[in-house]
Amino acid sequence: MSLPRFDRLSGNQKLALLAVALGLGALVIGAPQRGTITINERELAAMVEGEVDHVTPDELADWIVAGRQDFRLVDLRSAADYAEYHIPQAERLAITALADSNLARNEKIVLYSAEGIHSAQAWFLLKAKKFPAVYILLGGLKQWTDQVVFPESPAESASPAERIAFARSAERARTFGGAPRAASASLAASAATAGLSAAPTALPKVAPPAAPTPAAAAAKVKKEGC
Amino acid sequence: MSADSPAARRPPAPYMNPYLAGIGLGLVLLASFVVMGRGLGASGAFTSACAVAIDAVAPAHAQGSSFWSEYLKGGVGHPLKEWLVFEVVGVLVGGFLSGLLAGRVRRTVEKGPRISTRGRFVFAFAGGVLMGIGAKLARGCTSGQALNGGALLSAGGWAFMMMVFAGGYGAAWMVRRQWL
Amino acid sequence: MNAPFFKFGLFGDEASLIVAFVIGIAFGFCLEQAGFGSAKKLTAQFYFRDMAVFRVMFTAIVTAMLGLFYLAAVGWVDLSLVYISPTYLWPQVVGGLLLGAGFVIGGYCPGTSVVAVATGKVDALVNIAGIVAGIFVIGEAWPSITGFAESSALGRLTLPEVFHLPPGLVVFLVVLMAIGGFWGAGVLERRFANRSPKENP
């Protein structure tokens, strides 16, 4: 009985019916992007094993020196720790603030914490929310300090290639306010030699990252208005 | 294009079913959302053109003004190399193509029987002035704010859209001599 | 699928200008096909004789709205990366009234005036001159009216957020409202019908 009547509906009426059907579908779906998360555990496990989930302090340091602005560096530690020292360009975000943050899925995000545990957990949270490009700083701030700010001098038996690499990292350490240390020297001694304050884990004071110029920021915003 | 040209002599085709035209427009809008992450627009292109003109005549004033400098891109790239400007040029081309195919390209003045051409021009200009002011206050026009905001369920967009209809119906009685 | 494609870096700024041009062509084509290159057809809306403006606009809105909802629901589009213009409530209310009045007085809106010029309407050219003049006036006056012009800034605000309703429900209500509106438009047209420039230019 309903089929012949459907045929006698005008084209416009069929469109109206289609619209109502789609509207009902939307009603059933409720919210297109929900707050709950879905996890593809195999995919995540593969990422962890394939080691595509992290960046080394070496890589990060090179990016910063090269002036790359195409990523966001997130410091997950406390405000006090952040104020004392943070990697240049880093912005502070507590792990509890991640859900409400303005991190966008089309950004490359590098996370770090003191030793890497919190950053690994934050990585998992963001990956579960389908952020495609999230990375952990391998070894956290500890490894950053050891490898980038106070790189270890090569041993006597080092090859020429290793010495050249070390010269590069020594130079880079200086731009970060640090200095190379002898193979056996402790962190505290290095800090003292570099003329820094006496605290054992003292690191150079870092100027806050330069804010984008107002013109650049305004240009970015205007681009999308109508 | 004079009234005697071949394009004008062909009888104009009837307009498309508004629902089909609307679906077409909606799909274009959807494509813009999906490809660019932004919607359509028109008034922004006019503003860019105006800013460029002011900049040519009084550059210090234009670049010092917070309103115009937004459209001048602070010297980084040409202000007319802007998404909306290219889009509006496309609208010009698309409108012409459609008119050509439908036999609706003809040099004419759209007006009702009870008004002169000069009267029509006065109203056309005055209406445009109101529109320019309204569009900047509302941060968009019917294409930008109403269509985009409507589809995205933006509160401001819907409020704006309702007010456009209110303003139109409100002023219609006053200018009925122009159209009826 | 990572969409919006531009936001995920699939192509750059230069290519986006070409995209703009192509989208503009499609936009202008649809507008002219609907008859919106004609001021008489556009303004007939405001005398209840030809409700095409209402029909085209709301059909377009419903189409794009449903399309975006479903694409977001299957995870193909990231809605948080689609730009929504921030809400400035009172300026948008006043701006809407002015724009609506300007629409029926001038005969076109910024987008349709371009389509009209493309199809030879001289009055549309005058209209565009007026629009640019209006933009000039308010641009120069902006510093003096900033207090109002930037007032009631509510940021990126959607109807589901305002009414605390699930987006799906709002979508459904909008569809119902549109269809009800189309039916009502038909009733009004038949009541006010005189010589409407409905089907033919």
Image (cartoon, helix red, strand yellow):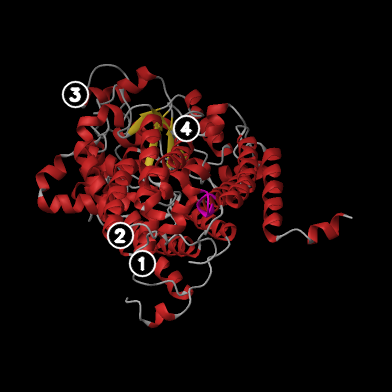
Q: Residue furthest front?
A: B114
Q: Which residue is mark 1?
A: C118
Specify whether disc 3 shares its chain with disc 1: no
Give the SS element for disc 4. loop
Q: Residue furthest bottom?
A: B6
Which one is in front in this view, the residue at disc 4 or the one at disc 1? 1
Circle 3 chain: A
Give the CA distance from mark 3 to mark 4.
53 Å
Q: Which tag, 4 or 1, sits closer to the chain's start?
A: 1
Classify residue C95 by image quadrant. top left
Q: Nearer the viewer, residue C91 or C180?
A: C180
**Residue A135 picture location, percent across and down:** 47, 40
Q: Which residue is mark 4?
A: C157
Image quadrant containing the N terminus of chain A: bottom right
Q: Which residue is mark 3?
A: A195
Q: Nearer the viewer, residue A28 or A59?
A: A28
Give the CA distance from mark 2 to mark 4.
45 Å
What amino acid is at disc 4?
Answer: Leu
Question: Is residue C49 within the magenta segment?
Answer: yes
Specify whether disc 3 shares its chain with disc 4: no
For disc 1, the neighbor class at 10 Å (few under 14, some 14 to 19, many from 20) is: many
Identified at 70% across, 52% down, the residue is A18
Q: Nearer the viewer, residue A155 or A31?
A: A31
Specify whether disc 2 shares its chain with disc 4: no
Circle 4 chain: C
Give the CA distance from mark 3 to mark 2.
87 Å
Identified at 25% across, 46% down, the residue is C134
